Amino acid sequence: MNTFRARSVAFHLAWPRTPIAAAAMVLAPAAWAGAPDFPLGPLPVVEIVGIAPQSAAAISRDRLPYAIQRATDRDVTQARADTLPDYLARHAAGINVNDISGSPFQTDVTFRGYRASPVLGSSQGLSVYLDGVRVNEPFGDVINWDMVPEAAIGGVLLVPGSNPLYGLNTLGGALALTTKSGRSHPGLMAEASIGSGARRRFDLSYGAVAGEWHTLLAATAFDEDGWRDHSEGRLGNVFLKVGRTAGGTDWNVALLGGRSRLLGNGLLPGGIEDAPGLYDLDRRAVYTYPDRTRNRLGQATFNLRSELSGGVELTATAYVRHSRRDTVNGDVNDDAGEPCEDDDECAAAVHPAVLNTTSSRQHGEGGSVQLAVARGDHQLSAGLSFDRNRIRFAQFEQEGFFTEDRGVLGDPEEEREPSSSVTGRARTAGLYASDTWQLAPGTWATLSARYNHAKVANTLTTERGVQPREAFSYRKLNPSLGLARQVNAAWTVFANVAQSNRVPTVIELGCADPEQPCRLPVGLQADPWLAQVVSRTVEAGARWHAEAGEATLSLYRTVNRDDILFHSAGTSQQGYFANFDRTRHAGIDAAGRLRTGNVTLRASYSYLAAVYAADGELFTGARNVRVTKGTRLPGLPRHTLKLGADWEPAPGWSVGADAVAVSNLATQGNEDGLVEDPEDGEPERRADWRIRGHALLHLRASWHPAPGWEVFARVNNVFDRRYESYGTVAEDVFPGGRPLAPGADDEPARFVAPGAPRTFVAGLRYRF
């Protein structure tokens, strides 16, 4: 079945004000899925899940006080999505994707409005784990989706809310990925595909068992020219796991290596008043280039699971992880055209372009250990974790010139000058425990808590020289309490209250002084103290499960206190990170699946009210925005509807369709309805620059001509719908794609992330 097994539901807007309204929301899945009143009896299916990233505590899903979503490798494969983020965007309730960079492996994934993004400096709110190892990079908590070994993924688990057991940065949820093994996935799987934009991809996995030993090898190779200009990309990764199972003990060692070279084209400006913008003229164009990111990764992981005496189960994980990231970005020189008094300043002023390059080196190691035991009506678990990271980051600038198509060439007579750098260390220790006990037949309570202690130490080097070393410590005890009640064999209701936290990242601490502002996205000037973000989630809902299908409804409300946002320093293009009193994410997630005969239907709906919950003034990169309580957060749709169907018309044949519809988005920099900061005595310039909603249809089909063989094809955006997935306000210095006339003033414009046009993919898959 090609569905993300949605078991999730969520709520704020406002809680129902009457018992009748509350009952209607809880009972809605039954009417939607056509669920009969099943008699009491054994559950049709008992699903066992872990309660932590690499957990020794296995528990029935119906005892969990929150709504998880799960998928297997077969679900992902049969869905025929382009990438793992693309699969999540089509099948997981509450997930949306912003194509800010334009690369399929550099997407900005949001869940309930919280981000897992590769963009340095963006506010992250989701923790991501691979076999129990947290893969949020320590410098900025970013997620490099291109370094996830998709051919090795055996399971996907999406956990909602501020779950303290998943550690730091689990503000809106956690994504836990587990890999295959030779024992769980023996045999060969090979898949090759080609598609639009000269796309070529090859995936391979081979698992083998020899007595007590098991081995798995998986690899992915990807190459494309892309659908936009100057958008070539390629990547490759290899995953090797070797392990042994003897008696009640299973251990394995896994090695992961990857490297990529991806081009992200960024946003395009729309029209200014009656003049068409570059996006209006050619959505395949790029504004300026190059915009290149090179990632490299090496990781070694050791995992152990052992059954001890007295029914105690031990899980242990240790890892070493090294990553490097190098970027090159061609952009407009902000100093061009500035008045100058000496030869050096005048030389800088005549260069309209600049090449910004960055270099990141991150080294980390750590481990965790957990014990779990069942005693009477209690399922107990406790564990501890430790992570240590070392970071080196440097940023350089080289002045240059634009080509006719807005490419940037560095002036060979100008040296590459360092602008800022940082060396730092981060240590995080966590101690956690959980107890799920049976209060009465069919009723379970879960109490969890985690104590986090983090220390971040930085030494910055700026234009003023080497700055004094700064060190900050953060401590927080995060509790969670939930109840789950099995009403009958088909229905379970649940409620949960949880808290988690996120400590400031190096990029945020390095740009936190209003007296020494920096430029977005990666300038570093000073590192004053910032408060940690504390997130609290209240969630309630119900789930229905039967042989014919399943449905889930969740209502949630998450409040961030001391959120970290970018504020204005009162100077153009400069600002600093600071704590914002409060933001709020609340809404509803509903999902269901129904199988009848040879047809499987699925649907999910999400309502998200993500708002600033206090008054304040922010800096969005181009202008100051005054927000009031209730102002929408940008880039997040209120309504998302996902529909899917799979039909097996004959043995060996399968046809499927996916439809995704989203409502409009607020544009960053236009949250208050203005397009530029009003000047004294001048009227306000207002415009409705929201990103309009859209609906997309995707089709797929497969045929099994012989045992083990499969031929497949898919069409994305069947009707070639023109749409955008994100917007921001910025100054357009290339109106209509041409440089500004001498002496002309640049105008604010809405820059948008163009959505991909209709694309085709076809391939061959073999499984033995």
Image (cartoon, grey):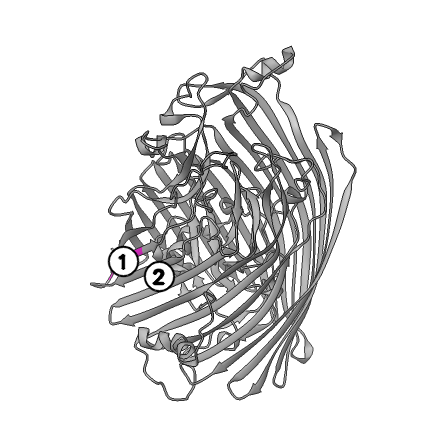
Q: Label 1: state its secondary structure.
A: strand
Which amino acid type is marked by label 1?
Answer: Gly
Q: Nearer the viewer, residue 423 or 23?
A: 23
Q: How many C-alpha atoms fall within 10 Å of the one at disc 1: few (<14), some, or many (≥20)?
A: many
Mark 2 = which residue? 2
- Secondary structure mostly taken by the magenta-highlighted segment of the chain: strand
Instruction: Say whether marks 1 and 2 touch (CB < 8 Å).
Output: yes
Which amino acid type is marked by label 2?
Answer: Asn
Q: Nearer the viewer, residue 22 or 541?
A: 22
Q: Specify the quadrant that holds the N terminus.
A: bottom left
Q: Nearer the viewer, residue 653 or 667?
A: 667
Q: What residue occupies the far left of the structure in this picture?
A: 649
Q: Is residue 248 magenta?
A: no
Which numbered circle lies on residue 656?
A: 1
Above or below for 159 versus 511: below
Q: Residue at x 66, y 49 (%)?
A: 504
x and y, in percent, of residue 690 in the image: 39, 46
Q: Specify the quadrant that holds the C terminus.
A: bottom left
